[in-house]
Image: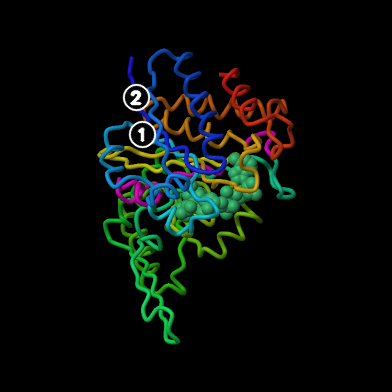
């Protein structure tokens, strides 16, 4: 039996609430399957830890995490600690430090999930976003000059390396080929005359290796419009870090809401552990009430199982989520139910 060592950083707000359910679901999958088991190690890092220690996580955190097969992360960020500190010093440090350059975010409208779009058949919302996750607008490069003076200047650099663009774009082409889907690149070369012109050029260059993959290119403003008006245009999507962040919250909105939106931060070469997290944040408005939806975290746990080589388990978890939605069983208030976070997780585990 394969034993996987999982680091759990439950984090802030609803993070610990939803992570407990992801763990429940993984235990259920392990018990049912019998080929794999887990050893979970919990790290109390996050905003509370920061308020006590002055750090979001210890200086040797990456060294510690390196020994694990994967990281499960709930959410980070809470009022009382500035977001640019809490996120940069924990989440982004791990994504960048472990070269998790692929952020894989499914946007799929399951049967029974709420959708605010009129006249859009459910099957039309079935995308997978490949978001660049290591550089771009999130490079953290810049300067704050003459701070507090009248000629204060801030510079936030977008960093688009040839290697960084090629590898994420090539990953997306391979995924589109494997799934027999079209690939759409989303950029903004009409205004961003260096970074996005370069991105488009590399999309075309790498495309020469994949003559069998049908491609499209969209500007990000038009892409956001099509996601609402004609979502079937998008199947596999590749885009930059910031565009991918924004478009996947829109994706969540059209595919059932934040409570259903999963994501995986992958280091495909497995040189470092990958990290699995729902795309939502710490949801301070509902934290502590026991009503956060754990299904996004459960789906994320499914993505982890797929990454470990059990793709059928992601399918089983997603199918079980769909059954709950169709039967309207064990759902939290955001899905129109009355179940608590823990009841929802238990209902899902029972399905498995
Ligand atoms: P958010 O995703 O936390 O919340 C947005 C809305 O979605 C809220 O109304 C919230 O109640 C709802 N929501 C989110 N998750 C839900 C769930 N599981 N079930 C039901 N409803 C859910 O975004 P925000 O309010 O902009 O950010 C809050 C904090 O989280 C900030 O500090 C932000 O920086 C941080 N954040 C962290 C991550 C992360 O750790 N990966 C991601 C996004 C935001
Ligand atoms: C996400 C989040 C993060 C991001 C923030 C919290 C830094 O919004 O994972 O979508 O922008 O990547
Ligand atoms: Mn986001």
User: Left or right of 253: which side holds 65?
Assistant: left
- Determine crowd level at label 2: few under 14, some 14-19, many 20+ residues with C-alpha closer than 10 A: some
Point out the image quarter for the N terminus.
top left
Report if residue 211 is visible in the image. yes
Q: Where residue 220 sits in the image (x, y, percent)?
A: 52, 63
Marks 1/2: CA–CA distance: 8 Å
Q: Could you tell me which residue is drawn at 65 percent across and 43 percent down?
A: 286
Report if residue 125 is visible in the image. no
In the image, residue 17 lies in the stretch drawn in magenta: no
Q: Could you tell me which residue is drawn at 60 percent across and 54 percent down?
A: 227
Q: Could you tell me which residue is drawn at 45 percent across and 33 percent down?
A: 303
Element assignment for label 1: strand
In the image, residue 103 lies in the stretch drawn in magenta: yes
Q: Could you tell me which residue is drawn at 25 percent across and 40 percent down?
A: 63
Q: Is mark 2 within 8 Å of ligand 1?
A: no
Q: Is residue 262 above or below residue 137?
A: above
Element assignment for label 2: strand
User: Foreground residue, 59 or 196?
Assistant: 59
- Determine crowd level at label 1: few under 14, some 14-19, many 20+ residues with C-alpha closer than 10 A: many
Q: Which residue is mark 1?
A: 70
User: Left or right of 260: which side holds 100?
Assistant: left
Q: Which residue is mark 2?
A: 4
Q: Earlier in the sequence, mark 1 or mark 2?
A: 2
Badge 1 vs badge 2, beta-carbon distance below 8 Å: yes
Q: Is mark 1 within 8 Å of ligand 1?
A: no
Q: Which mark is residue 128?
A: none
* Extreme residue toward the bottom, this view: 150
Point out the image quarter for the C terminus.
top right
Q: Is residue 30 above or below residue 190?
A: above
* Residue range of the region highlighted in magenta in the rendering: 91-113
Q: Where residue 51 sits in the image (x, y, percent)?
A: 45, 50
Q: Where residue 345 sits in the image (x, y, percent)?
A: 59, 26
């Amino acid at each position: 039996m394969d034993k996987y060592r999982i680091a759990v950083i439950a984090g802030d707000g609803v993070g610990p609430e939803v992570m407990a359910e992801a763990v429940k679901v993984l235990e259920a999958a392990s018990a049912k399957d019998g080929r794999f088991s887990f050893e979970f190690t919990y790290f109390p890092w996050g905003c509370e830890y920061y308020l006590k220690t002055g750090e979001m996580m210890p200086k040797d955190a990456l060294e510690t995490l390196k020994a694990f097969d994967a990281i499960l992360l709930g959410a980070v960020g809470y009022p009382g600690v500035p977001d640019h500190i809490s996120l940069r010093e924990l989440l982004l440090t791990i994504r960048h430090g472990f070269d998790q350059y692929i952020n894989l975010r499914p946007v799929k409208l399951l049967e029974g999930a709420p959708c605010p779009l009129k006249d859009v058949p459910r099957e039309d919302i079935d995308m997978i976003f490949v978001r660049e996750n290591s550089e771009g607008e999130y490079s953290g490069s810049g300067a704050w000059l003459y701070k507090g003076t009248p000629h204060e200047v801030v510079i936030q650099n977008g960093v688009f390396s040839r290697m960084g663009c090629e590898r994420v774009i090539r990953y997306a082409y391979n995924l589109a080929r494997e799934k027999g889907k079209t690939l759409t690149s989303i950029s903004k070369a009409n205004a961003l005359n260096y970074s996005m012109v370069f991105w488009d050029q590399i999309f075309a260059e790498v495309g020469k290796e994949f003559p069998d993959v049908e491609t499209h290119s969209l500007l990000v403003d038009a892409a956001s419009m099509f996601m609402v008006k004609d979502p079937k245009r998008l199947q596999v999507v590749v885009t930059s870090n910031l565009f991918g962040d924004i478009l996947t919250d829109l994706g969540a909105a059209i595919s059932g809401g934040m409570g259903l939106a999963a994501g995986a931060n992958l280091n495909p070469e497995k040189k470092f552990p990958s990290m699995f997290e729902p795309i939502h944040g710490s949801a301070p408005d509902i934290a502590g009430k026991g009503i956060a939806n754990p299904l996004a975290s459960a789906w994320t746990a499914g993505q982890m199982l797929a990454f470990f080589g059990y793709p059928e388990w992601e399918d089983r978890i997603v199918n079980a989520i769909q059954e709950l939605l169709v039967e309207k069983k064990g759902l939290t208030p955001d899905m129109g139910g009355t179940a608590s976070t823990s009841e929802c997780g238990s209902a899902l585990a029972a399905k498995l």
